[in-house]
Image (cartoon, grey):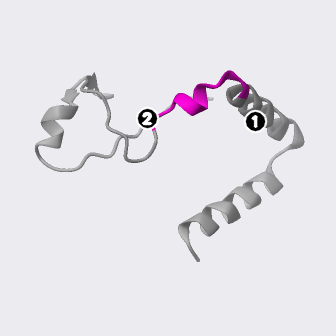
Amino acid sequence: MSLKEKLAALKTAAVQKMPPEALQVIQRARQRLEESGLAGKARKAGDRAPAFSLPDTSGNVHDLQAMLTRGPVVLVFFRGGW
């Protein structure tokens, strides 16, 4: 099973377990995002990120350019609590 197939199966299982009210909230939020046009402006896999420095949860500042000198970097952004 490919990763795409596994993700689709996980999504299907999650939707089946989700209360209808929660699913409606998610669907409305997705629709608003699509209508806003912001999704089309988002970075895609393989895009180059701009140079930046950001603190982690412990207050340590990390510089993208410095990390790239040590090898590839994977960026993960956590939206925060729902």
Outermost residue on the right side: it is 20
Q: Is residue 4 left or right of residue 78?
A: right
- Label 1 element class: helix
Residue 26 badge: 1
Who's the residue at 70% across and 56% down the image?
11
Give the labeled residue for mark 2. Answer: 77
Q: Is residue 81 above or below residue 46?
A: above
Name the amino acid, label 2.
Phe
Q: Is residue 22 left or right of residue 68?
A: right
Task: Point out the stretch of residues depicted in magenta.
Answer: 35-43
Residue 38 on image: x %, y %: 59, 25
Residue 63 on image: x %, y %: 19, 29
Count every numbered label the image shows and give the total.
2
Check if residue 42 falls in the magenta segment: yes
Who's the residue at 21% across and 26% down the image?
60
Check if residue 73 falls in the magenta segment: no
Q: Quadrant of residue 37?
A: top right
Who's the residue at 21% across and 30% down the image?
62
Q: Quadrant of residue 9?
A: bottom right
